């Protein structure tokens, strides 16, 4: 009777993993023979792991990453200018803690989006709030938000992300309204939150892509100086493999 009361109490205290582990312990004679503190440590570890898994699941759902990518699955065998030691350093998340900027550039098919999502996944594992967005889709959405009165709310939501991933920078020309929205969004994050951008366009051509010298100077000053960079080279990796969704050579 007392055992069931203990299990019920654990559930009321919102410790379901601990309750489940306790029921399992009762059915395992080798565990029952352990000291009280050892058994308690096992119960606490089960609850801790369960909570970490729930938190990761929640963060990944909020991130909405385009690819189910992981640093552990990165293909370093293919030569594409990818520095393994640099990527592993970035995966620790220190640059996110320091509110830095990461620019990933390279030709189409070299794995830019996949690497960005792998780093986003790693950031979620470290407990950071991540948002992934394709810039060609985000800019029209900001225009709609401005017209329906939700612009400030959308910017505030983006500003809360510890890491904002903006994929496909520079795919299409931008107008005056888009330039202003970009500057507003980037200004909100400078020195406060981390930003990751991917682009087929080399960084040295980003300024002219903004289409206005004054806005170009302002945006580039906030993005490029002191940014971490990954410059991928070579042809499309999609041609190398079409069998494994976890292999970045498919991106």
Image: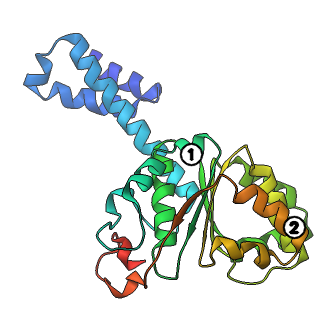
Above or below, 247 against 195 in this view is below
Q: Give me the C-alpha separation between circle 2 and circle 1.
A: 26 Å
- Vertical comparison of 60 with 36: above or below: below
Say which label, 2 or 1, has the lower sequence index: 1
The image's mark for residue 222 is none
Q: Quadrant of residue 77?
A: bottom left
Q: Residue at x 43, y 81 (%)?
A: 234
Closer to the camera in the image, 126 or 180: 180
Q: Note whether 150 is above or below 176 in the view shown.
A: above
Residue corresponding to mark 2: 215
Q: Residue at x 11, y 28 (%)?
A: 28
Label 2 crowd bin: few (<14), some (14–19), many (20+), radius 10 Å: some
Q: Position of residue 101 (x, y in %)?
A: 64, 54
Q: Quadrant of residue 136?
A: bottom right
Q: Position of residue 14 (x, y in %)?
A: 46, 30
Q: Secondary structure at mark 1?
A: helix
Quarter that holds the C terminus: bottom left
Q: Is residue 64 left or right of residue 78?
A: right
In the image, 168 versus 28, the foreground residue is: 168
Query: In this figure, which residue is indicated by the disc labeled 1?
Result: 95
Q: Is residue 56 visible?
A: yes
The residue depicted at 30 percent of the width and 76 percent of the height is 244
* Residue 223 picture quarter: bottom right
Q: How is the rendered protein coloured?
A: rainbow
Image x and y of residue 123, in percent: 50, 49
């Amino acid at each position: 009777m007392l055992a069931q009361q203990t299990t019920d109490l654990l559930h009321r205290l919102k410790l379901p993993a601990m309750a489940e582990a306790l029921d399992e312990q009762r059915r395992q004679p080798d565990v029952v023979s352990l000291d009280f503190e050892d058994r308690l440590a096992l119960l606490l570890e089960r609850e801790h792991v369960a909570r970490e898994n729930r938190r990761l699941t929640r963060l990944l759902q909020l991130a909405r990453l385009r690819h189910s990518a992981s640093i552990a699955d990165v293909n370093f065998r293919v030569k594409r200018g990818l520095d393994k030691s640099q990527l592993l350093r970035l995966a620790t998340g220190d640059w996110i803690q320091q509110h830095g900027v990461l620019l990933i550039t390279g030709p189409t098919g070299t794995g830019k989006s996949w690497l960005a999502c792998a780093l986003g996944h790693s950031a979620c594992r470290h407990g950071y709030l991540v948002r992934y967005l394709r810039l060609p889709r985000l800019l029209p959405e900001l225009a709609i938000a401005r017209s329906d009165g939700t612009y400030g709310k959308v910017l505030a939501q983006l500003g809360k992300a510890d890491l904002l991933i903006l994929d496909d920078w520079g795919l299409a020309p931008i107008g005056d309204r888009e330039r202003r929205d970009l500057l507003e969004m980037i200004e909100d994050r400078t020195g406060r939150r981390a930003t990751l951008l991917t682009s087929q366009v080399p960084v040295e051509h980003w300024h002219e892509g903004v289409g206005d010298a004054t806005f170009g100077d302002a945006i580039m000053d906030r993005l490029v100086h002191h940014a971490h960079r990954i410059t991928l080279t070579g042809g499309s990796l999609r041609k190398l493999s079409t069998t494994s969704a976890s292999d970045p050579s498919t991106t």
